[in-house]
Image (cartoon, rainbow, N blue to C red):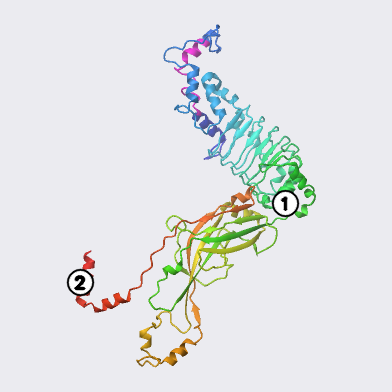
Amino acid sequence: MAGCGRLSFSAAFQEHLGRLGLRDFPCGFGSWNKSRFDARTRRHGGRLGRGTQPGGQEEAVPLGEESPEALVGLLRDPRSPWALPPDCSPQEQHLRETAVLTPQLVCGSNIFQIFRSLRITGKGVEEVDEGLLQLQQLEELILSANQISRITSANLPRTLKVLELCGNAVADLQGLCAQPPPDLQHLGLGYNRLCSPSQDKYLTAHFWPNLVSLDLSFNNLTDLLGLVSQLSSLQKLRILLLQGNPLALIPTYRGFLVDSLPKLSILDDIYIWPDERHRFHGLARQPELIRSEVRVVVSIGEIKGVPDPSTHQQLEVSSEFPVTTYSYCVTYEFAEGEEIEDSSSTEVTKIHPSPVVATLDVDSSAQDTGETKGQQEPAAMEEPKAHSAKVFVTPGKPWADTIDCSYRKEHTAKDLVGLKSYLTAGTIVSVVEEKVLSWPVDADPEEPEVPKGKARQGTQKNGAKGPVPKDKQKKKKKETPRELRSDPPIRRTLGTRKVTLEALLATKDLVTTVCDFGILITKQPLQPPDPEEKEKEKRKTPLNWRKVKCSSRCR
């Protein structure tokens, strides 16, 4: 019996039958076929006969009823309201047609003898109960995308040849292997929660003597040597899927499996050709080459489309300080581990989020985090994240139409489970602008510099009015450049994008991405006042000024 609040297989099966409508028009018994079945039953002494007369002519259809052909046509026509949805299986369509032609076969307990294949996916099934044993002829059972955590083999029909449990929550195979179906040929356990080495011992010929196909993809299996030692006993195994497991990230993973399982034909959906088997010959006898660490190379190329910051500087007229400098960098997240910059080691896996196109849109893409002040940090700045990842920053580069980052860093990950989680989640790539204001060491940033020009000429060092002597002006020009001090940098995120890396868990070893952030909308800088306008403003009387203010309010 199913536990309280848990959806059992039996309940999902009854719901499945109700959705098929095997007892409703145009299926089953009803006024639409009553005379046909009543006449045949009487004619054959209580047994149902054929739908044709002895001379081979079709029986006449009484008024108000439909012929079997017309009823089947209602099921097959995609425009018919009685047609099944497109995602239904051919077996379900065949079952409905059987309910039209021979509805007695789907009445009562007879329906359990019809099923050879059954597919119940995405229905939230949590328990496979003993109700499944009623399907005594069942050969294929697909229960993908449910919430099954354990399977009791005593509740499985002994006739099963295909069992698909992909996308559930199975973490333990002990219950499944207690009395497994003896003739099972395919076992699908992809996208579950199996871990090494506790579950490896259940993957042997002792439990699955006739297994031909095995799907263990996207679990948390890490022990490659231990798993291969168990799988080698499956003499009939020809198809194996292990991609998506942490062990599949090991550099020698595929070659070691190809040489260790000589009867295998397909590994991770890729056919094993003779030349590949020859290339990896002898690798199975060198287990010392298997190291549980992965090297990942991250390369970042160019940034394009960043607006010229010089057009947005809001400096007062004739103001020499502060000196404003801008630099640009790219940040990305990576799983915690060791880093080797500019390494010449063999590249096993590569991530290339480059070039980064910095044509940004504040509204629809990366959020502008505003301006934040902080201490200037080196290029290898790292910030720990809650999901066990660090943030790496490329060296800052000055503005250009095309900013060449030329960044390359090699990361070594020994925590394969953590690396798998990181690749599944993807990484966050951002373009950051850094603004630094520099002031003279002996100047107060709160007070503006004395303006140049005529105003400067009218003031001498001792405060007396009058022109500065020419000899002192020449001496001033020969002075060394003033020493500057810099304020903490002001950082602004121009754009952020998530880069998907899950392909590296499958068969790919290279991901190349162009990050397009859209269009960056910037505020128009305030235009400095025109000197002539300033002079006119001074000449205005207080009365005129009050009139201007009053007029402005009226608007």
User: Does the magenta-highlighted stretch encompass residue 34?
Assistant: yes
First-in-chain label (1 vs 2): 1
**What quarter of the picture does the C terminus occupy?**
bottom left
- Residue shown at 47% from the left, 15% from the top: 34
Label 1 to label 2: alpha-carbon separation? 84 Å
Q: Is residue 69 above or below residue 330?
A: above
Residue 497 coordinates in the image, percent (x, y): 51, 56
Residue 433 badge: none
- Res 547 label: 2
In magenta, the rendered stretch is: 20-40
In the rendered structure, which amino acid carries the disc numbered 2?
Lys
Q: Residue furthest top?
A: 55
Majority secondary structure of magenta residues? loop
Type of amino acid at the residue the image marks with label 1: Thr
Residue 251 included in the magenta stretch of the image = no
User: In the image shown, does 13 or 65 lie closer to the viewer?
Assistant: 65
Q: Disc 1 on helix, strand or loop?
A: loop
Vertically, is 116 above or below 69?
A: below
Q: In the image, 295: left or right of 492?
A: right
User: Dots 1 and 2: beta carbons under 8 Å?
Assistant: no
Q: Position of residue 105 (x, y in %)?
A: 56, 20
- Between disc 1 and disc 2, the foreground one is 2
Residue density around tag 2, few if under 14, some if 14–19, many if 20 or more, within 10 Å:
few
Report if residue 68 is visible in the image. yes
Q: Nearer the viewer, residue 243 or 48?
A: 243
Q: Is residue 542 left or right of residue 511?
A: left
Helix, strand or loop at label 2? It is: helix
Residue pointed to by mark 1: 252
Residue 245 in percent (x, y) is at 65, 49
Residue 543 % position (x, y): 19, 76
Answer few, some or many: residues within 10 Å of disc 1's Cα (few below 14, many 20 plus, some between 14 and 19).
Answer: some
- State whether residue 27 appears in this view: no
